[in-house]
Image (spheres, rainbow, N blue to C red):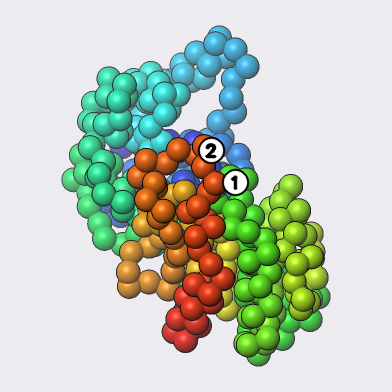
Amino acid sequence: MKFLLIQLRRIGDVLMTTPSIRLLHESFPNADVTFLTESPSDQVLNENPNLNEILVYRKPESITELLRYFMHLRSRKFDCVIDFFGNPRSALMTRFSGAPMRIGFDFRGRSLAYTHSVKISGEATYSAADKAQLLRPLGISGSDFRLDFFPEEKDQIYANNLFKKLGVEEKDFVVSLSPVSRQPYKVWPAERFGQVADWLIEKYSAKILFLFGPGEKHFVESVRALMKMPALPDYGVPTLTETLSILKRVDLHLGNDNGIRHFAVAANTPSLAIFGRPWAANWTPPKPTRHHALEYDPGCKKKCVYPKCELECLKGINVEAVKSELEIVINNLN
């Protein structure tokens, strides 16, 4: 069997497919499995032992180039294509692949692309579990939705050297803080992050380590400027696998609903994420879990009108609520 799995766009979405990749490999251990995604999301799959090949999709500059790409996929003669993404472009890729078995969600206007359309649950459930529903036509089901992300040895060496450089000792209580997101409806106010960071330092003698990606340093600078206590100094922007290795070394992660939070889940590092517009249940492993979430529904989350609002969903989460939830997480640390 030759499988093609498609999940374009964001890093978090790709990570949510990794339980399905694992389940597929367990059911078809001799199958050839290819994964199609975009950069930089391909980096979270590079060391995944359950994949044979990773294809990096680059947006074509013309219709001719797009059709040429479709024909290339068709020439690969895949037996089964699973479209985890389900947007018009990935649906077209699936349809033109020519695979005898094509699986995707029963979204409006997409069903003609698939031989097997799967109705998604109407409830707010963990995204990794939702994506695994696409394996049902293959007779595959599962309940283990751990995220798979594998660092290389060099990434672990990087994290060890970074901690030494920053003066972090083995006994220190290190909290990673990621106040970043490129979506305004996911960004909790910087002054509130600053207050919580100061409280962690004052009450728990925590060492605060900021995590951010390319072009995101201004989020960190905003929080740092509003803190009364010093955090660990900045350092060069790490790669995705280096970020994962850092998260394996810290004791606790706090931040917005972003890709770094999913890395904390993959690293099995206790975490607390603050949610705005998205439902926390979609992006937080179900209980019992080491991963906590806070959200506030002002009554409009089901019928969100963003950007025609004041982001009450974010503003409704106050500092005391975050402190209280953090105390629960900290008290349960091993």
> Residue 92, percent across and down?
40, 21
* Residue denoted by label 1: 184
Q: Which residue is mark 2?
A: 307
* Image-based side of 48 in relation to 260, left or right: left
Instruction: Name the residue rendered at 54%, 46% in the picture.
Output: 310
Q: Which is nearer the N-term, disc 1 or disc 2?
A: 1
Q: CA–CA distance between discs 1 and 2?
A: 9 Å
* Dot 2: element: loop
Answer whether labels 1 and 2 touch (C-beta < 8 Å): yes
Task: Count how many numbered circles sit on residues in the image.
Answer: 2
**Residue toward you, 72 or 160:** 160
- Along the viewing direction, whichever of 329 and 275 lies nearer the viewer: 275
The type of residue carrying mark 2 is: Pro
Question: How busy is the neighbourhood of tag 2: few (under 14 within 10 Å), some, or many (20 plus)?
Answer: few
Q: Residue type at mark 1?
A: Pro
Residue sitting at the far top: 64
Give the answer, above or below, for where 8 lies relative to 161.
above
Residue 286 lies left or right of residue 147; in this view the side is left
Residue visible at 77% across and 60% down? Answer: 221
Q: Quadrant of residue 104?
A: top left
Q: Residue at x 43, y 59 (%)?
A: 296
Q: Is residue 279 above or below residue 201?
A: above
Whether residue 233 sits left or right of residue 257 in the image: it is right
Expressed as whole percent of the image width and height from the top left, the position of residue 232 reads: 76, 74
